Amino acid sequence: MKILKSPKEAHEYRKTLNGSVGFVPTMGALHEGHLTLIKRAKSENENVIVSIFVNPTQFLPGEDLDKYPRRLEADFEICKRAGVDAVFTPNAENMYSEDEILIKAPKIKGYILEGFFRPGHFDGVLQVVNKLFNIIKPTRAYFGKKDAQQLYLINQMVKNFFFDIKIVPVDTVREKDGLALSSRNVYLSPEERKRALSISKALKRAAKLSTVTDNIDEIKKEMMNILDVDKLQYIAFVDRNFNYINKIKHGDTIILIAAYIGTTRLIDNIWI
Ligand code: PAF
């Protein structure tokens, strides 16, 4: 497995590849969710490249950039065992320069929900994914549905910037008890982890309830009864294009939650 440390090395390596390239962009601390993306990429492409880069521009001041889990050696091992061909691990110095041309997330859908509570977050995500796409030039790129708004915006960027890349959405991977896998779960104490479960439980209950009512207020009320979080940021109902909806429409609804358990901010969603 090749370790590529700079955009230049990655560019050179890319030129040697024949056939399709599946790309899995990550910030490392790889878990079963990432592994599912990698396996899917392996099954659909001749080559698989994973990037590991804790991108500073998508963290707001005061967020967890410094304490974000970094486990590069363990991540390399996971990638090697999964049959990844190359891991791209640049650093901020070789990815960014001073006074850069910037990319702005769309004014509305980049600034609602996650973008409202983390203003500028998606500018940073789109900036780095744009760079990664230009460096790796993948045939297909794999993203988890857990970051549903990110997935939507990346699809929009691909359309708006005419990237010739297929974005492949992959279902959220959960622990047996329902907790969505996230690199940030390591921050949770055992007591917090128990309460974090109320998020996936509320979503599951909402999905079940939506089979008997399309009334969002009713569903939301029931979700609030289940949630045992310290600070709820939002419960939202949107269609697959991230327009707010006021009635459930099966096949075109995403229900999303963002909440703090202690000092850990968690997001989760369910597509119905
Ligand atoms: O979803 C993530 O891990 C990150 O936002 C991404 C897409 C790797 C960009 O840094």
Image: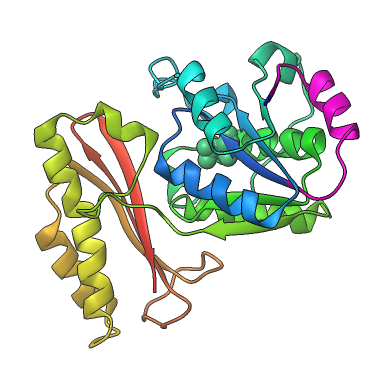
Residue pictured at 63% horizontal, 49% vertical: 42
Indicate how the structure is coloured in the image: rainbow
**Residue 125 percent coordinates (x, y):** 60, 37
- Quarter of the picture containing the C terminus is bottom left
Q: Which range is magenta? A: 2-21
Kindly indicate the quadrant of the structure image that contains residue 253. bottom left
The answer to whether residue 107 is seen in the rendering is no
Can residue 28 be seen from the camera position used here? yes
Q: As displayed, is residue 151 above or below residue 131?
A: below
Q: From the image, which quarter does the N terminus lie in?
A: top right
- Left or right, 245 with respect to 200, comes to right
Drawn side of residue 161 relative to residue 35, left or right: right
Number of numbered labels in the structure image: 0
Q: Front-most of 183 and 228?
A: 183
Judged from this view, the residue extending furthest toward the bottom is 212
* Residue at x 57% of width, y 45% of height: 38
Query: Residue sitting at 57 percent across and 59 percent down?
Result: 169
Q: Based on the picture, tell me whether residue 268 belongs to the magenta stretch.
A: no
Determine whether, in the image, residue 93 is placed left or right of residue 125: right
- The location of residue 108, given as percent across then percent down, is 57, 55
- In the displayed structure, 22 sits above or below 75; it is below
Q: Nearer the viewer, residue 181 or 77?
A: 77
> Residue 190: image x %, image y %?
12, 33
- Position of residue 51 measured from the top left corner of the image (x, y, whole percent): 63, 31
